[in-house]
Image (tube, rainbow, N blue to C red):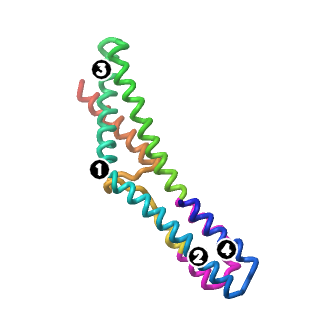
Amino acid sequence: MFRIASYRIEQSVAVNISQKGSLRNRNLIYKELIRAVNMHREAMRFSDSSISRFKVMFSFMIAVGVISASLNLYRISQILSFGYDVKKLLFPLMRVIIFPFYMFIGNYVAQKIIDHNNVVFATTYNIRWYATSLNVQKMILFLLQRSTKVFSLNIAGLFVGSLEGAATLSSSAISYFTVLHSMQT
């Protein structure tokens, strides 16, 4: 939906710019920009509502994932320090491999949504706004001001879904493992 909004913004000005000055042309630009703004708003609302519906589940998955990764890393270190047993090592190793996989996939999707929102800003910035009427320029300025606000997928006010968030989760899991491992000695 973000891509559709950016396409509509681009086309609203690009197609109508060749027919300068007419009142009908300005009304068409207004209507197209309004449709694009509504599409962008709906895309943001849909993203936020889908996150808010599943925030309890996502919060639970984050907590369980970090704890599980830390404990399984600790278990692997225990197995390796007391003797190498492939059967005992297999399940904790699989869990440690699966954790980063689902964590990075979820955060990658969130990062893509954020990137698509940023494309709307870039498209609005790159259109030929200077060739439009003053009222259309004001409307485009409003779009640019709105797009400068950071759009993120916030989970329960504690975690922002992005690749940076994935790195934070990995770092947390390794930190907790380090604490567990240091308490062993």
On residue 56, the disc is 1
- Vertical arrangement, residue 127 with respect to residue 176, above or below: below
> Does residue 153 appear to the left or right of 130 in the view shown?
left
What is the spatial separation of the Cα atoms under label 2 and label 1, in whole angstroms? 37 Å
What is the spatial separation of the Cα atoms under label 4 and label 3, in whole angstroms? 64 Å
Q: Residues within 10 Å of mark 3 (few under 14, many from 20)?
A: some
Disc 3 marks a residue whose amino acid type is Gln
Disc 2 marks a residue whose amino acid type is Ile
Write down the quadrant of residue 46 in the picture. Answer: bottom left
Q: Are marks 4 and 2 in contact (CB under 8 Å)?
A: yes
Q: Is residue 182 magenta?
A: no
Disc 4 marks a residue whose amino acid type is Val
Which residue matches tag 2?
A: 140
Write down the quadrant of residue 92 in the picture. Answer: top left
What is the spatial separation of the Cα atoms under label 1 and label 3, in whole angstroms? 33 Å
- Vertical arrangement, residue 184 with respect to residue 35, above or below: above
Which residue matches tag 4?
A: 13
Residue drawn at point x = 53 percent, y = 71 percent = 37
> Does residue 141 appear to the left or right of 88 in the view shown?
right
> Does residue 71 appear to the left or right of 114 in the view shown?
left
Which residue matches tag 3?
A: 78
Q: Residues within 10 Å of mark 4 (few under 14, many from 20)?
A: many
On residue 134, the disc is none
Determine the secondary structure under disc 3: helix
What is the spatial separation of the Cα atoms under label 4 and label 2, in whole angstroms? 10 Å
